[in-house]
Amino acid sequence: MKKKSRKNTNGNDMRARQRKGFYRRLGTICEKMVGAGYFELFPESSLRLMFAHRYPPIRVVLGGNRVMTEEEAVSYRRSLVNLFTGHHVETLTGERISYARFLTDALVLIHHVQFGIADRFRAASILIRTFAPYFTDGEWYGRSKAGALKLMGVADIQLYDFYKGTLRCRADGMAVVNPGERNVIRVYRLGHQTMLQDIDGKKRVIAKLGVPSQKEIKVFDWPLLRPSQLGFVDMDDNLAMPLYAQQHALNRFEERTSFPSGYVQAYLADLFTKDTPRFQYYGGRSLLECYIGKHKVGYFVITPHDGKWVVRTFLFLTNDGTPEGRRLAELTDWQKLDRKYLMVDRMDAFFAYDISGDAGLRKLFVKAGCGSLLRFADEVGSIAGIQPESADFIYRYLAKVR
């Protein structure tokens, strides 16, 4: 009789351990989704099929040699891992499953029940009826898929580059989009159109802001904006023009909000294609309101130049030149240097100090129209686990300068 080789034995042992670990994870997920007692209804044959066809972790493939450097690729993959492990879907029983598990183990369970069991064993109809609210044509699945794609978009904006271009990922190789696919994300770099523009007597580099095309993965659509969409009433409204941005505007946005500058491209593209822009117009320029999520954080300053709209800079909500900044100055007598020293001219102070928890300061900022900054800081702080310090520093500074 031939002896089994040690190599085959070790391989079989490893596979058995992997299968056992998969079953354990699947049982936990099953209970979180539909409650106890249902996992035991799956026969061994079903469990083995799910193990054989289980979805692998997300794999990133670069769509070209100039998409990103090796160092950026490592950073991008790490960012995706952190986003998928740090964010969760909520099941219909109120439990949470990380997106990392949802995109792999939970999906193979859902897809197997929806497409793979029919009436093949006694309890199949019970499982199909129980898991039906999680099927691919349902609201829960659509919401969870949208959440996964949104997290991928967050990873994309982190490697936005004014000169190199915008990152865009293709998700049709993911099982959540097309059941049975092997969780491959292909990433492309969409090049920007840049040019020199004379602004206030100086040549400035500006980049055209486009909307990634829904038809072709590596192409921008270029929206043309009418004056009335930005609040300009003294111009011919038939004169629709493309939108550009100075790098200065993107830098100021990132510096003052602590949010990646790539968000500006995504925000403006979404705003002008799916939403109604909100703005204030005076002095020949439009102040276009900027929101991060539902929180108003400031304004983009837009002016016309030689047949194009140019985003000149970003004003934080408390900056000079904004309605809220003027009200804050009237209420406090704080000068520009005071605000800069206290860091209330950007999000830093709202993250670092418990302004929201201080009754006096909270009342002051809310009265000035800056309550959204407090809510934004509270939301980010709870997600990131930030523990702000006491706001006494602000009172000590004000006592010293008065």
Image (cartoon, rainbow, N blue to C red):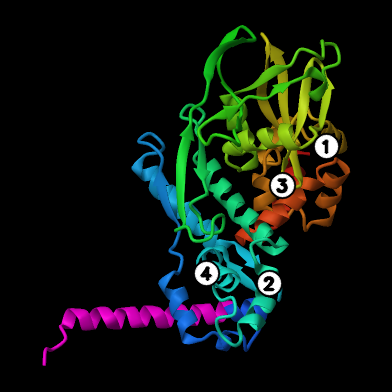
**CB within 8 Å, label 3 to label 1:** no
The residue under label 4 is 108
- Quarter containing the C terminus: top right
The residue under label 2 is 132
Quote the CA–CA distance across marks 2 and 3. 31 Å
Disc 3 vs disc 1: which is toward the camera?
A: 3
The residue under label 3 is 293
Above or below, 248 against 19 in this view is above
Q: Nearer the viewer, residue 353 or 154?
A: 154
Quote the CA–CA distance across marks 4 and 3. 32 Å
Quote the CA–CA distance across marks 3 and 1. 23 Å
Can residue 117 be seen by looking at this rendering?
A: yes
Disc 4 vs disc 3: which is toward the camera?
A: 4
Q: Quadrant of residue 213?
A: top right
Q: Which three-letter amino acid code belongs to the residue tagged 4? A: Val
Q: Is residue 338 magenta?
A: no
Query: What is the x, y in percent for residue 364?
Result: 85, 46
Q: What segment is highlighted magenta in the picture? A: 1-29
Q: Which three-letter amino acid code belongs to the residue tagged 3? A: Gly
Q: Nearer the viewer, residue 121 or 101?
A: 121
Left or right placement of residue 376 versus residue 364 in this view: left
Can residue 316 be seen by looking at this rendering?
A: no
The residue under label 1 is 328
N-terminal label among 1 and 2: 2
**CB within 8 Å, label 1 to label 2:** no
